[in-house]
């Protein structure tokens, strides 16, 4: 409670400073127009008290559930406000007063809850407060909808009403505070002794400041209020086209038929429309909040007992996590998916041994066990695309599983079925666009409207829909089973999306897209949503009647809002991969089967220009940039051992991979494969192994090989690609080499001196014998080259995806002569699965070597 009180005090101080500055300059018209934007700069400070109080009430909900319900509602309101693209200080100012009203509930103790007469009164008060919050949420939805640039006249017309509404919410919160104060202050002996003394002080902290902020207005709003008042009020202006035209011309705007019809709509109609939108958002956000609160509570308890894996809701997946990394809350996604594959393979074998028939879902092993499907499975689970999978991400993934599906079926669907569905949606969208083109070519009232629609949406829709790669064919058995899963999944998804779109009258706003999709990951449902919307618009334009301007505007805005959410997801992924030092172009090529690739390439300059290229404090001197991390050279990440001693110090490296790709462009080649092979920009370089030299101590120096450096930072892992393959066998030389650059350089100087001296022929012959012996030993040792070729094949199968490349790089480092037992612990646990080597070899022969369980033996 002390943290919440401190947050309220800080918000009060910040609001007081802004109030002082605004009051000083209020007489100036320019300053008045900037007052609201100045107040909006402290939005985060004004929202923080509500965040703290919501956490306080969520915790108190364990003791008394109604408090948790109020806390959850407050959390949802804060999240919805935070997710908006812009915030208005007049709306945000209500949140400190909400926090000021509800913080007193944190003083309640179990002794208070035991008194039935008190809890009944408290429950009645909390219900009223929740209803006030819901009404405020509905009002906020309408308010922000009107502040859009295309509806600015609507906002000005309702300026007086909006100010009255905000005053009404302040009055309701004041009444709620008085009720709670009366109930709690009379029972001080049943409250927390430390907090009960503050009840009478808290309710007066920010009331006057909230009143000041909610009554802010700019010059245009004041003029609009005066005009409506002089003309007899809103109703009189609504019913007069002449007055409406005068109102619009006063602000230099044209009143379109759509805006005219909206302004003339009754208050009841507007309320119902916005209430439906808010209810949809609220219910979606409340489910997320309830899940997070429950997960956080359970995780604390389970971590204290056994480990984070106890939180996983599926017993089979829980066993996989327990045997893979029992004490970790996140694990490398490749290791986790390998564990899934091995676990279910053993489950299928055990079932067949016991019942002499295959399990109904045993066919999924053909998909789950194949390595080239693992990246698709990882993309489905790894929400932040970090290369690591957390327990919470696993649960989010499992909660979407249909009740009648097994976990192997669900995993198999995301391995292949989801990509196949997207390919079908792509076909549907392209057919709809072709149909619109034909309609536009026909003479009629729709031709101009359709042309305007296509000019706006055709390019972004084409980029979003046509970026996926074709898929390989499945076996006959798998095709039949997979088609059944696909049909069930598409019916489930489309039914849900259609129901949500119907509530919104097939109108999408930026803030409602995630609620309609049912997921914050737009890639999961963007193509189904797009296909349903485009089909709806084809039906609209196919009608014989003329198209209303409002319908055309709404159709274009809906597609543009969906595009904006799609673009924002690309921004998020771009920043995640850039901060990890991962090749962004490569990731967009393969992530979600290339769903974002075409849009990213077409708008590459915009995405790059919005990225802050200046290094942060830890960027300038972090573990990636340390020279100790480099294999050789004086800080040049592309230098090899053979050139480090002779090449001059390299210039500071910039992001060279994208520049090299632009300098020598190679058009993407779409094949029947999923695209997990290395990109077609250049053939894979052959592994270069040079003749080992001898240092002064007679020990073999490491051969020259391409290297890859990987370091972890928190829960993210960054990879710098310095030319090719991880050096997996450098550890056998690192024990003896010492400082390679100094040894090699000194040896070359000594050899040159020895060759120039007369009378030292015996030593020269001795040196030649050593070289011959060294050459013989090298030729008799083919294992390093074999290992490197195996690594190239394994990396090609994974397609250089971010998380998977991470695993290869870090495994190479863990074998770097240091014997890092702690880092090897997860792999050691994973290998404990292999208690039946003979059975695995037989199974590998039966399955063509695709059995994923054998990966543990290979490692």
Image (cartoon, grey):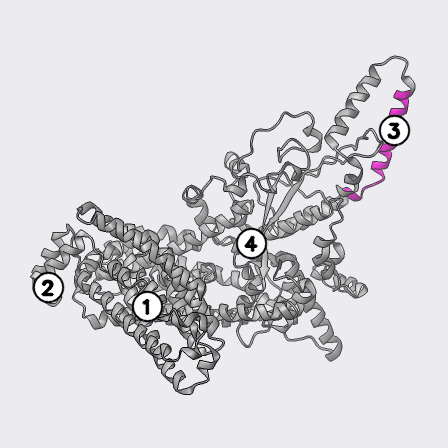
Name the residue carrying label 1.
203
How far is mark 2 from mark 4, CA to CA? Answer: 56 Å
Which region is colored magenta?
763-784
Q: Tell which tag, 2 or 1, sits nearer the viewer.
A: 1
| Residue at the image position 42 percent from the left and 64 percent from the top | 4
> Which secondary structure lies at badge 1?
loop
Name the residue carrying label 4.
386
> Which secondary structure lies at badge 2?
helix
Task: Tell me if mark 2 has few (under 14), some (14-19) or many (20+) residues whose alpha carbon lies within 10 angstroms of its own.
Answer: many
Q: Earlier in the sequence, mark 1 or mark 4?
A: 1
Q: Tell which tag, 1 or 3, sits nearer the viewer.
A: 1
Name the residue carrying label 2.
237
Is residue 777 one of those drawn in magenta? yes
Q: Earlier in the sequence, mark 3 or mark 4?
A: 4
Name the residue carrying label 3.
770
Is residue 321 one of those drawn in magenta? no
Task: Please identify the quadrant where the C terminus is shown.
Answer: bottom right
| Residue at the image position 37 percent from the left and 50 percent from the top | 459
Say which of 621 and 859 sits in front: 621
Contact between marks 2 and 1 (CB within 8 A): the answer is no
Residue 147 coordinates in the image, percent (x, y): 26, 57
Q: Earlier in the sequence, mark 2 or mark 1?
A: 1
Can you name the residue that lies furthest to the right here? 762
Residue 30 coordinates in the image, percent (x, y): 20, 45
How far is mark 1 from mark 3, CA to CA? Answer: 89 Å
Residue 439 coordinates in the image, percent (x, y): 29, 58
Quarter of image, res 495: bottom left
| Residue at the image position 48 percent from the left and 59 percent from the top | 423
Q: Earlier in the sequence, mark 2 or mark 4?
A: 2
Main SS category, magenta section: helix
Say which of 232 and 562 sits in front: 232
């Amino acid at each position: 409670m002390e943290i919440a009180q401190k947050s309220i005090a800080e918000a009060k101080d910040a609001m007081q400073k802004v109030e002082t500055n605004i009051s000083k300059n209020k007489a100036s018209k320019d300053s008045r127009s900037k007052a609201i934007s100045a107040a909006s700069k402290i939005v985060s400070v004004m929202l923080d008290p509500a965040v703290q109080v919501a956490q306080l009430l969520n915790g108190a909900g364990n003791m008394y559930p109604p408090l948790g319900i109020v806390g959850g509602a407050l959390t949802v309101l804060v999240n919805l406000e935070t997710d908006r693209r812009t915030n208005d200080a007049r709306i945000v100012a209500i949140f400190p007063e909400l926090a000021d009203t509800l913080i007193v509930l944190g003083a309640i103790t179990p002794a208070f809850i035991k008194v039935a007469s008190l809890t009944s009164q408290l429950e009645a008060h909390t219900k009223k407060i929740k209803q006030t919050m819901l009404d405020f949420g509905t009002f906020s939805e309408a308010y922000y909808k009107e502040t859009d640039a295309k509806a600015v006249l609507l906002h000005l017309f309702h300026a007086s009403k909006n100010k009255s509404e905000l005053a009404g919410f302040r009055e309701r919160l004041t009444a709620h505070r008085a009720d709670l104060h009366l109930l709690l202050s009379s029972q001080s002996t049943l409250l927390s002794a430390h907090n009960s003394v503050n009840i009478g002080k808290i309710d007066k902290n920010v009331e006057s400041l909230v009143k000041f902020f909610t009554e802010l207005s700019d010059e245009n709003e004041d003029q609009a209020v005066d005009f409506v008042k002089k003309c007899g009020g809103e109703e009189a202006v609504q019913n007069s086209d002449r007055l409406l035209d005068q109102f619009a011309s006063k602000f230099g705007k044209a009143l379109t038929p759509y805006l005219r019809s909206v302004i003339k709509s009754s208050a009841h109609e507007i309320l119902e429309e916005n209430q439906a939108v808010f209810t949809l958002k609220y219910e979606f956000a409340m489910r997320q909040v309830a899940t997070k609160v429950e997960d956080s509570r359970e995780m604390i308890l389970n971590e204290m007992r056994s480990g984070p894996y106890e939180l996983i809701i599926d017993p089979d997946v829980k066993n996989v996590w327990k045997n893979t990394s029992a004490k970790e809350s996140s694990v490398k996604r490749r290791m986790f998916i390998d564990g899934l594959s091995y676990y279910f393979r053993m489950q299928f074998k055990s079932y067949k041994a016991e019942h002499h028939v295959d399990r109904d879902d045993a066919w999924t092993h053909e998909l789950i066990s194949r390595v080239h499907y693992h990246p698709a499975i990882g993309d489905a689970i790894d929400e932040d695309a970090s290369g690591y999978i957390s327990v919470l991400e696993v649960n989010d993934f499992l909660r979407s599983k249909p009740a009648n599906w097994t976990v192997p079926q669900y995993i198999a669907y995301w391995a292949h079925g989801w990509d196949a569905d997207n390919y079908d949606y792509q076909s549907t969208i392209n057919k709809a666009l072709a149909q619109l083109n034909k309609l536009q070519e026909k003479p009629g009232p729709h031709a101009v409207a359709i042309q305007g629609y296509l000019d706006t949406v055709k390019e972004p829709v084409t980029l979003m829909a046509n970026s996926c790669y074709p898929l390989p064919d499945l076996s006959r058995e798998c095709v039949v089973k997979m088609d059944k899963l696909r049909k069930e999944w598409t019916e489930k998804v489309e039914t849900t999306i259609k129901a949500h779109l119907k509530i919104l009258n097939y109108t999408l706003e930026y803030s409602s897209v995630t609620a309609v999709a049912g997921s914050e990951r737009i890639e999961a449902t963007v193509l189904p949503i797009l296909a349903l919307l485009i089909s709806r618009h084809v039906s609209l334009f196919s009608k014989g009647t003329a198209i209303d301007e409002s319908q055309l505007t709404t159709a274009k805005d809906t597609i543009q809002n969906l595009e904006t959410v799609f673009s924002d997801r690309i921004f998020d992924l771009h920043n995640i991969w850039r901060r990890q030092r991962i090749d962004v172009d490569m990731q967009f090529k393969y992530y979600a089967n290339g769903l974002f690739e075409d849009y990213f390439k077409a708008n590459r300059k915009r995405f790059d220009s919005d990225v802050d290229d200046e290094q942060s404090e830890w960027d300038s001197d972090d573990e990636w940039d340390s020279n100790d991390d480099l294999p050789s050279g004086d800080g040049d990440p592309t230098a090899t051992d053979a050139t480090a001693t002779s090449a001059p110090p390299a210039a500071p490296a910039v992001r060279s991979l994208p520049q090299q790709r632009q300098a020598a462009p190679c058009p993407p080649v779409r094949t029947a494969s999923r695209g997990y092979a290395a990109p077609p920009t250049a053939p894979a370089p052959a592994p270069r192994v040079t003749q080992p030299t001898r240092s002064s101590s007679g020990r073999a120096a490491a051969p020259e090989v391409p290297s890859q450096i990987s370091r972890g930072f928190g829960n993210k892992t960054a990879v710098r690609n310095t030319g090719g393959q991880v050096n997996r066998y450098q550890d056998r030389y690192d024990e003896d080499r010492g400082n390679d650059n100094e040894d090699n350089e000194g040896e070359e100087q000594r050899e040159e001196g020895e060759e120039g001296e007369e009378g030292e022929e015996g030593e020269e012959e001795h040196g030649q014998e050593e070289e011959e012996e060294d050459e013989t030993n090298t030729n008799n040792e083919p294992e390093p080259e074999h290992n490197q070729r195996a690594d190239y094949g394994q990396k090609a199968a994974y397609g250089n995806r971010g998380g998977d490349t991470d695993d290869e790089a870090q495994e190479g480092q863990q074998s770097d002569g240091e014997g890092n037992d702690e880092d090897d612990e997860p792999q050691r646990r994973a290998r404990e699965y292999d208690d039946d080597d003979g059975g695995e070899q037989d199974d590998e022969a039966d399955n063509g070597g695709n059995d994923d369980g054998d990966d543990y033996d290979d490692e």
